[in-house]
Image (cartoon, grey):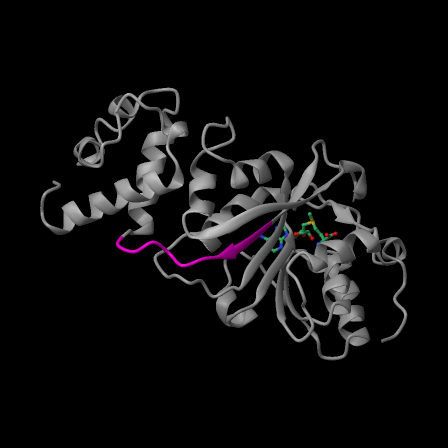
Amino acid sequence: MTKLPPLREVIARHGLSASKSLGQNFLLDEQLLDRIARVPGELAGERAYEVGPGPGGLTRALLRAGATVTAVERDRRCLPALAELQEAFDGKLRVIEGDALAIDEAREAGQDAHIVANLPYNVGTALLVRWLGGEIWPPWWTSLTLMFQQEVAERIVARPGSSAYGRLAVLAGWRSEARLAMKVHRSAFVPPPKVMSAVVHIVPKPAPEGVRAATLEKLTAAAFGQRRKMLRSSLRSFPGALEALHALGIRPERRAETLGVDEFVAIARRLDKDEHQGLVR
Ligand code: SAM
């Protein structure tokens, strides 16, 4: 492996001034980047998929860890800097110019890839919902290691009863394990964002049987849409939901944030079963 120039020099040489509209906040500390690349575990011989490599700091760290990397970047100004990395890591890096929200990731990245990304904040939650949502489970990816604003990271790993607990926590919790792997101070980024960041690590687990993701999603949208209200009020117009609460012995005076992920799953399962039997209209 040839010695790589410092990231600061790469940014200066390629004129990569950070663009706010593309959510660009670059990480330049190679030790920190190596720590992030260790979050998914041993990457030697593994496939990694990175969204938004920018000047390539995290990309380098993934390549140093021994991964074969597919990276999708929207900002074509970054491509020459990434081409230098491709040369240095002979055949181990493939770069796709494009919008991560528009490409067929599973096909491009390959089955079982570890997704690792310092996400552009403006598309981070949309990508997470896409990776965690849908009826197909287990997913095409092996793990997610994602940088978010700390407040979003806390919502992903939140436990029932906390103010951060809501749709994202249920989405992450019902068929995956999510943990906050590390916090990253705003001063580590160039330019520093207004808020702190954190890396979340997510691995899929078997999905509970008899539940459709779409039903659970609609249920949590209704329940947390009016999170201060009792379930009997927030779920009043949700077909079959109050009957399901009754059948499961869940008191309708409770509020959404007191329900565990298992309870949401049980309600959704009941709704799917009742709908299947033609009991819900
Ligand atoms: N990975 C680099 C790092 O850690 O220093 C850059 C991270 S920066 C927060 C986000 C990157 O995502 C930028 O390079 C930006 O151009 C890119 N980006 C923004 N929107 C994108 C999209 N829809 N698809 C692919 N890349 C995108």
- Seen in the picture, residue 85 relative to 176 is either above or below; the reply is below
Q: Quadrant of the N terminus?
A: bottom right
Q: Is residue 150 left or right of residue 232?
A: right
Residue at the front extreme?
249
177 vs 78, nearest the viewer: 177
On screen, residue 69 versus residue 157, left or right, reads: right
Regarding residue 15, the answer to whether it shows in the image is no
Residue farthest toward the bottom in the current orientation of the protein: 91
Stretch in magenta: 201-210
Q: What residue lies at 19% left-to-right and 31% top-to-bottom?
A: 246
Vertical arrangement, residue 223 with respect to residue 65, above or below: above
Residue at image x 22%, y 36%?
Answer: 248
Total marks drawn? Answer: 0
In reply to whether residue 207 is colored magenta, the answer given is yes
> Is residue 215 located in the magenta-colored stretch of the structure?
no
Q: Quadrant of residue 157?
A: top right
x%, y% of residue 190? 80, 43
**Which of these two is toward me, 246 or 22?**
246
